[in-house]
Amino acid sequence: MSDLGPARHLVAGALELQPGEVADDSDVETLPAWDSLGHVKVILALEAALGRTLSSGELAQIRGVGDVGRLLRGGKA
């Protein structure tokens, strides 16, 4: 499993997909389920995992699994 495994699992769970359906490079352009409602679900799942509310700057930068992974690892999106 790549270092983005936890991010892939979070996105898959939020979008009600199987983890195998989400690749490391998946994003809002490549996953049909990652529409506007899906994006809210991803954000809520990410905030729950982090135990905090994301800043507006962080929210604006989340476009894909890599961004979710960076935030899970404690970095900026």
Image (tube, rainbow, N blue to C red):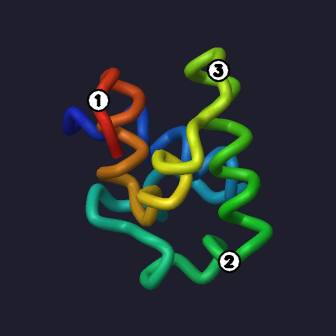
How busy is the neighbourhood of tag 2: few (under 14 within 10 Å), some, or many (20 plus)? few
Residue 25, percent from left and from top: 28, 65
Query: Which residue is nearer to you in this view: 26 or 57?
Result: 57
Marks 1 and 2, Cα distance to the nearest angstrom? Answer: 24 Å
Give me the residue at 51% from left, 60% from top: 60
Q: Mark 3 highlights which residue?
A: 52
- Where residue 32 sits: x, y (%)? 60, 83
Judge from the rendering whether residue 59 lies leftward or rightward of residue 5; answer left or right: right
* Kind of residue sitting beneath label 3: Arg
Residue at the disc numbered 1: 75
Kindly identify which numbered label has been placed on residue 35: 2
- Which residue corresponds to the image point at 68% horizontal and 58% vertical from the top-left? 15
Asked whether, in this view, residue 45 is left or right of residue 12, the answer is: right
Depth check: 43 or 26 in front? 43
Q: Amino acid at mark 2?
A: Asp
* Amino acid type, residue under disc 1 in the picture: Gly
Residue lying at the far front in this picture: please name it. Answer: 56
Say which element carries label 2: loop
Q: Is residue 40 left or right of residue 56?
A: right
> Do the CB atoms of the residues marked 1 and 3 lie less than 8 Å apart?
no
